[in-house]
Image: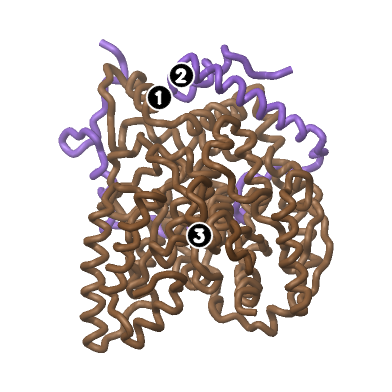
Chain colours: A purple, B brown
Amino acid sequence: MTPINKANIEYLAGLARIELKDAEKEKLLGDLTNILNHFEELKEVDTKNVEPMTGGTLLTNIERKDEIDTERLGKGKSGFPETKKGYLKVPPVFED
Amino acid sequence: MDLKGLTIKKFSEGLKKKEFSTEEGVNAFIKTIEEKNSELNAFLKFDLEVHKERALEKAKELDKTIAAGKPVGKLAGVGLGIKDVILIEGTRATASSKILEKYTASYDATVIRKLKDADALFLGKTNLDEFAMGSSTENSAFGVTKNPYDTNLVAGGSSGGSAAAVASDMVLGALGSDTGGSIRQPAAFCGVVGLKPTYGAVSRYGLMAMASSLDQIGPFGKTVEDAAILFSKIAGNDPYDATSYAIDYKNITEPDFKEIKNLTIGVPDEYFVEGLEKEVGDEIHRVIEELKSQGFKFKKISLPHTKYALSCYYIVQPAEVSTNLSRFDGIRYGTREKAKNLLELYKKDKSEGFGPESKHRIILGTFVLSSGYYDAYYNKAQRVRALIKQDFDEAFKDVDVVLTPVTPTLPFKIGEKTMDPLQMYLSDIFTVPANLAGIPGISIPVKGRVGKLPVGFQLMAPRWREADILGIGMYYERN
């Protein structure tokens, strides 16, 4: 059984904040069905006593001093599409 | 000045002997880009003029410094191409995506700072599959990059622009990023050297994050030695990337070949399987025979979970992508569509800004992380990933280095695989294991393929053992 259908593609797109056209949904449904079928092979692997590998690092803490880098401070703001009084401006969160 | 086959090493020697000036060098790079880029599309058009002016200005400064008899950096005048997911302050950084078409970087990536400190020059930003997702550069919003050996063929991906730029002598070297093979596969397709360093060897500060547990920045060069030179300049710990380590890579550009010759090379059966094109397989065996005849010891090994690496990768990678790409929402970077509220803004920006493959992976990633499927897919894949790493750990008790093909096929035709993502993903089958295990891998062109399409072979080593694969590579290219 394929766990994916048109309805849950729409649901997932909603979660991801993407609007899909009908043709895009059809194509995605076909492609994802193929890929999820391919993933079925993982069921053959016995992972009962295996801990999941949750990252690429060696899982040791790397620390640095919590200091402000004045040279770089505020530089990210130059890319803001809209600002007001030096702050990032966004459209209303709630409708009127 | 002839750039054909000119390496970083030879360029630096020529500069030292005053055979040419850095300004002459820059003009030669610019001329070659002007001649070849309209056909190959290796460099993106955005801010190409700005990069050119900056490079010329810097070259003039360097020439003055040299004329005054003062020392210059190890990469003085060396022209490089930078994959457009790495930030250079004050210039466009698009990730070959419409969503970032108007975004200008506000700071330098750490690798860029380091290369600037070594007096390298940047000739422009190179093309890629949108957000580095793809194996052919066909997912770029700004046109496909063509293979310099045959323009009907793909240059590979996702760092296809960087590989093609180096292969066509537009620059002496380049940077790419490798999440599942995005440096090694295009290097193999374009006949250049590409190194994916150990996870944590190079700072990723200023690299647009795609799949954070897999991404690494690495160099392209015309020779293994050049790749080693660039790697030695970008490696190292950076307080701005807490996954980066301080490893001593001293003498990595000058290996002790006596020690290198003592390394044992493992060849895993699991990489010589159905789907491996005969011509590629034959060439890999020719490399093995040549290295054997030079005295290298070989051993058969087994990496039993190799078969599952692709499925594992295409669960873990989209999961991380769906998280990382959520930041491109029209709020902070570049363009913003008109919208009456925040939700509409998100939807408009993402729907119009992301290309089909990005949407595909975001949806797939959202699915494998969603409640009810998390255990069956994501959690399962993370466990399989642990087994893949364990395979390598076991193998490296027996051998020092592993030798495999890089790609199952020769470079394929433009358009051949675009309709079937699964077929496209299968071109990453031999490169994803190194990313999943966090180990270094290098793609080296097989010698003696004059008049034929390039083939690459891959060497992988335990974490932090870049010296071994670079050393064997340098030995192979010199003997």
Instruction: Give the answer, above or below, for where B261 lies relative to B367.
Output: below
| Residue on which disc 1 sits | B351
Q: Image check: A42 left or right of A96?
A: right
Contact? badges 2 and 1 (CB < 8 Å): yes
Dot 2 crowding, Cα within 10 Å, few <14, some 14–19, many 20+: some
Three-letter amino acid code at the position of disc 3: Gly
Question: Which quadrant: the N terminus of chain B?
Answer: bottom left
Question: Which quadrant: the C terminus of chain B?
Answer: bottom right
| Residue on which disc 3 sits | B218
Residue at disc 2, secondary structure: loop
Cα distance, mark 1 to mark 3?
31 Å
Quarter of the image where one finds residue A29: top right
Residue at (81%, 41%) from the top-left corner?
A49
| Residue on which disc 2 sits | A20
Q: State how many labels appear.
A: 3
Instruction: Give residue B154's position: percent from left, percent from top.
Output: 52, 46
